[in-house]
Amino acid sequence: MTRTSSRWRRVVALVAAVLATATTAGAARAAAGTGAPPPMANGFGLTQVEPAVGGPTDFYLTVTTPEVTGRHHIKIILPSGYYDDPTRRYPVLYFLHGSPDDPVQQNYPALTMSHSMITVIPDGGARGWYANWLDQNTRLGAQNWENFHLQQVIPFIDANLRTVAAKKARAVAGVSMGGFGALHYAQDHPELFGQTASLSGDIDLSADSMDLRLAVVASLIDAQGALCGSSSGFCGDPANDPYKPGVDSDALFGSPYPVFNVDWRWNAADPSQHMDRLAGVGVSIYVGNGRGVPTDLEFWLEGASKHVKDRMDALGMSYHYVDYGDGSGWGTQCNGGHNAGCWEQDLRDLIPRLERAFAS
């Protein structure tokens, strides 16, 4: 009698699970028929505070989370055939934007061309730097960006969309600040990601690339506002300063200055010093040369990417590395600078390669 009851409970649970899946799939198909985004249930600490904006395959959510103060966008791009087969599951690319962008601004045509994977673009803040900040008591409030993305956004997406919730079917890539975030996340949690890619990323924050470390510091302290607000006049509208308010230079990873090892947290977070953690993860790096102009950030990022390449060579790692120089042979919109024209071509190269890796 007990075994029979137990068996019936398992049958009932199975039927309930099947019905729940069918209901979710039906709701998604219904949403697609109306031209609306699919329904997404709150959970994992994320609360939707506004209706989803966009269509059935390209839309964004606005959420709040205890991990990061404020409201945050999550942009989602589904394959065009997502609603055709309610049993098919898809790998996911998590694409991390640069500073001081927003997910809604990430309108690369290449991101909409895949028919075999989902793309998710979470908010990384104007200068969140894809990390849990050391100082959680600045004027910005809670700044646990890594927790937000890895402990909340990923399970939220897996629960609401038909994903393949496994390392082999998950990639993280990003541009500029997001390039740092992509390698940093994959190094911190190689069990989550099978592929990672940096597009013009700040991937060397060691003392060897002190210029890039200080660029991060500049975003923290709002050096732009300090310089532009001087007697020479503000560079733009102070109300639109993306790095306002400034915070202490130690807020992110502690002291950034390489004296008596007080900058050890910066070294611990620096991707270039921990490439060995990416064993078993596919690595792709794209960078230009800024046309040899030191005022173009890409000029400095090329050196950072070369440092990372040298580390991978020393470790005997396999990787995909593209230095497109001045961009003359890299698509039709790239001039070798730190800009979207080059990143669009990077993505046109990266996405088919991710699709092949997922398929294998």
Image (cartoon, rainbow, N blue to C red):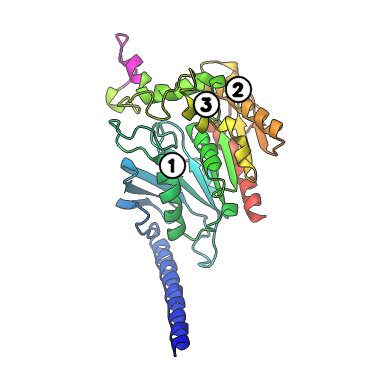
Q: Amino acid at mark 2?
A: Gly
Distance in Å between CA atoms under marks 3 and 1: 18 Å
Side (left or right) of 136 relative to 337: left
Q: Are marks 1 and 2 in contact (CB under 8 Å)?
A: no
Secondary structure of residue under mark 1? helix
Q: Position of residue 307 (x, y in %)?
A: 63, 26
* Disc with the residue nearer the chain's start (3 vs 1): 1
Q: According to the image, label 2 marks what residue? A: 303
For residue 165, above or below residue 202? below
What residue sits 51% from the left and 58% below the top? 163
Q: Are marks 2 and 3 in contact (CB under 8 Å)?
A: no
For residue 194, above or below residue 198? below
Secondary structure of residue under mark 3? loop
* Disc with the residue nearer the chain's start (2 vs 3): 3
Q: Are marks 3 and 1 in contact (CB under 8 Å)?
A: no
Q: Amino acid at mark 1?
A: Glu
Which numbered mark, 1 or 2, is in the foreground of this view? Answer: 1
Q: Position of residue 53 (x, y in %)?
A: 35, 50
Given residues 296 and 129, the one toward you in this image is 129
**Labelled disc at residue 146:** 1
For residue 1: magenta? no
- Magenta-tinted stretch: 224-236
* Disc with the residue nearer the chain's start (1 vs 2): 1
Rate crowding at label 1 as few (under 14), some (14 to 19) or many (20 or more) other CA atoms within 10 Å: many
What residue sits 39% from the left and 56% below the top? 37
